[in-house]
Amino acid sequence: MPRISDADRARNEEAIRAAMDRLLRGELPPGGKCDLKTPAAEAGVTRTGFYPKKNRDGTTRPSPYQHLTEEFERRLKAQRDAGEAPDPRTAQIERLKAENAELRSRITARDESIAELKAFRIQAVSQLTAQHEEITRLRSQVVEAAEAGNVRRMPNTGSRSAPFGS
């Protein structure tokens, strides 16, 4: 793996910092995001230079641009904590997630309401059916009793007052 000179490294760091500044101002290139991949591509360096390396013995050593990674993440976090979103898509994603959660809760509430109304409808129809059957049964008893001559008319008192003791 070829090593780069100090001058090349300094030039790369300047290009990376300039790309980071543009990203944090919200100037995203087409198809770019506010992540490490974009400033690396803008500066023309590989992303591997941003992540720590492992030695053959298993120990880690810092990468040439790891300090820039930490700086970028720190500045991005500070902007997000301040309520600023350099990437409008991130803000849109958060807004859509909140809207999705609210809509899901509304759907759940409506589903519960619909289930209650369906149960009420089933109970009401059952009661109406039972009452209709009872009325039909009583009417048929009256008809049968009239045919058998077991029905007598109550005398009409003429006055519309309530009977004694009611």
Image (cartoon, rainbow, N blue to C red):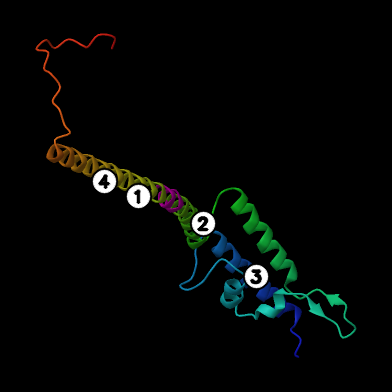
Question: Would you identify the image quadrant in which residue 72 lies?
Answer: bottom right
Question: Looking at the picture, does residue 27 appear above or below residue 112?
Answer: below
Residue 100 in the image, given as x and y percentages of width and height: 46, 56
Q: Nearer the viewer, mark 2 or mark 3?
A: 2
Q: CA distance from mark 4 to mark 1?
A: 16 Å
Name the kind of residue labelled 4 in the image: Glu
The answer to whether residue 155 is magenta is no
2 sits left or right of 98 in the view:
right
Q: Which residue is mark 4?
A: 133
Q: Which residues are magenta?
A: 107-113
Name the kind of residue labelled 1 in the image: Ile
- Give whichever of 156, 136 is nearer the camera: 156
Q: Secondary structure at mark 2?
A: helix
Residue 166 in the image, given as x and y percentages of width and height: 28, 12
- Give whichever of 136, 35 is nearer the camera: 136
Question: Looking at the picture, does residue 140 appear above or below residue 37?
Answer: above
Q: Which residue is mark 1?
A: 122
Residue at the limit of the structure toward the left, as seen here: 158
Name the kind of residue labelled 2 in the image: Glu
